[in-house]
Image: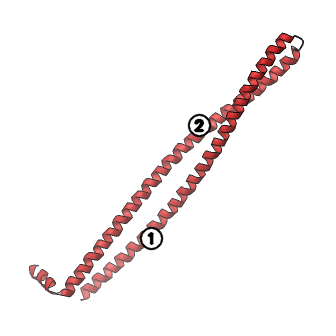
Amino acid sequence: MPQTLANIQDDSTLMLIAGIAIVVLLVIVLVVVVSAMRIRAYKVRFHHLLIETKEKNSYIKILEKEAADFRQQVEKNKKELALFDETKRKLGQEQSEYKALDKVYKEHKKELDKATGTLHALEKKYEVLTEAHETLQEKLKSLLEENSKLRTSNARLLTKLEKEVAKALREQGKK
């Protein structure tokens, strides 16, 4: 073994081949490390996107439930207003009762306007969140496609590199 190392050290071609082999190995290690770092970064980014999507979906469900509750409240208010209109017709002869009913009617109308305004605001928020959700889904899809392309490219490069190393080793064995 020491004699073989001494022969290699004395022969400049063998030293050159050994140097090239070391450089090739370092390049392979560098490519593998960089690829692993990229894959890890994409994996973390994908995980965060999934978590954000789940959170936004749960928030959307909460908003949909609140919107349904507000719609029920609006329907309830409309029914109450119809009842008050009927009562107002029946009790139109008595002025004092009419004023009391009119006052109640105005209060409920304000509540209805507030509920309607809140409903419109919630519907706008729902639309914004739906658009954000769709945008995030598109980003996720593009990231998955890009990740797949990079994996395919890395596999091709690794195969090509392995072939070149095998070829270099065969050529070295022939020499």
Q: Is residue 175 above or below residue 51?
A: below
Where is residue 92 drawn, in percent x and y? 88, 15
Where is residue 27 drawn, in percent x and y? 32, 73
> In the rendered image, which quarter contains the C terminus?
bottom left
Decide which of 107, 143 is in the foreground and name it.
107
**Residue depicted at x 31% and y 69%:** 29
* Amino acid at pointer 1: Ser
**Distance from the alpha carbon under mark 1 to that under mark 2:** 43 Å
Q: Which mark is residue 62?
A: 2
Q: Quadrant of residue 93?
A: top right
The earlier-in-sequence mark between 1 and 2 is 2
Decide which of 166, 124 is in the foreground and name it.
124
Left or right position of 44 against 68 = left
| Mark 2 element type | helix
Q: How is the image coloured?
A: secondary structure
- Circle 2 residues within 10 Å: few <14, some 14–19, many ≥20: few
Q: Is residue 97 above or below residue 108?
A: above
* Amino acid at pointer 2: Ile
**Residue depicted at x 52% and y 43%:** 55
Decide which of 118, 65 is in the foreground and name it.
118
- Circle 1 residues within 10 Å: few <14, some 14–19, many ≥20: few
Left or right position of 54 against 87 = left
| Mark 1 element type | helix
Q: Which mark is residue 153?
A: 1
Left or right position of 79 against 133 = right
Q: Quadrant of residue 141?
A: bottom right
| Residue at the outermost right position | 93
| Residue at the outermost bottom position | 175
Where is residue 10 drawn, in percent x and y? 13, 86
Where is residue 13 drawn, in percent x and y? 21, 87
**Residue depicted at x 73% and y 26%:** 110
